[in-house]
Amino acid sequence: MTKLLFEMAGAIVDSHMLDVGRVINIAHHALQCSALPGDMAEFGCHVGRTAAVLAHIVDKPLWLYDSFAGLPDRAPQDAGAAGNFQRGSFAIEKAEAEVLERFEKHGLRKPIVYKGWFNTIPLDKLPERICFVHLDGDFYESIRDSLRLAYARMVPGAACIIDDYGWNGLPGVQIAVDEFMADKPEKVKPLVTGNDKGFHAVIIKV
């Protein structure tokens, strides 16, 4: 099963940067949440690689959010982040079109795509209920803003996976999550990826 999942994900992602541990964790939690009410979402979809894997394994509406302009400015909490993470990093011309092309190529249900910074997303452009969400915003403010939007809409049992949680190359991620969750009943659980450079965590809504 693991081999088949990796081969499927590899074909969809089409990237040497694929981290099998991350894909397995994301797939596991998405499948566990697939019977819950609500839609799936991803904040920070880039060119839609992880999103396409989600759409391949779970047939639910999928909401994707990204600036499609690369990263925003760093906040003070991002001090010490890896040097290649700067304003505008990872911007790709026609990235939004590439997302839709990837879904069409693999015969996947078309996602609902919203272009904009996370702190500008109107509340009526969010799903009413979320059963699974993936946060991949890299910087403190992006994670803070996307977690604020997603958490309130997560149904009981829903999973939120936060990419880069625990990685010292993007310290703002963990700071944002720990601050937000400090007064919440859920615990943040780091996930093992099998890769000493792969870090993320999950929150299960109670």
Image (spheres, rainbow, N blue to C red):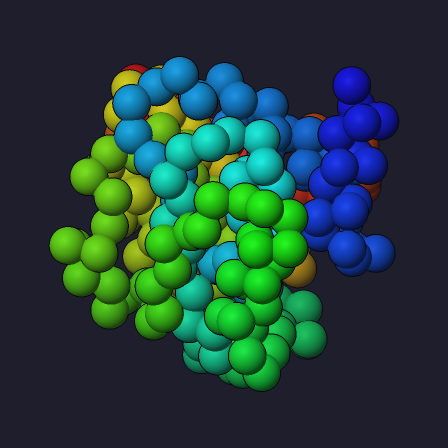
Left or right: 106, with 65 as reference point: right
Decide which of 141, 153 is in the foreground and name it: 153
Q: On the image, which quarter does residue 47 sit in?
A: bottom right
| Image x and y of residue 12, in percent | 71, 48
- Residue drawn at x 68%, y 38% is 22
Q: Is residue 86 above or below residue 19?
A: below
- Residue drawn at x 59%, y 46% is 107
Q: In this view, does 36 lie above or below 47?
A: above
| Image x and y of residue 56, in percent | 59, 37
| Image x and y of residue 176, in percent | 40, 51
Which corner quadrant holds the N terminus?
top right
| Image x and y of residue 88, in percent | 54, 82
Left or right: 130, with 166 as reference point: left
Q: Is residue 176 above or below residue 117?
A: above
- Residue drawn at x 66%, y 60% is 169
Left or right: 180, with 15 as reference point: left
Left or right: 104, with 66 as reference point: right
Which corner quadrant holds the C terminus?
top left
- Residue drawn at x 50%, y 18% is 32
The furthest residue to the left: 124
Judge whether residue 61 can be spotted in this image: yes
Q: On the image, which quarter does residue 122 sit in?
A: bottom left
Q: Is residue 94 above or below residue 77?
A: below
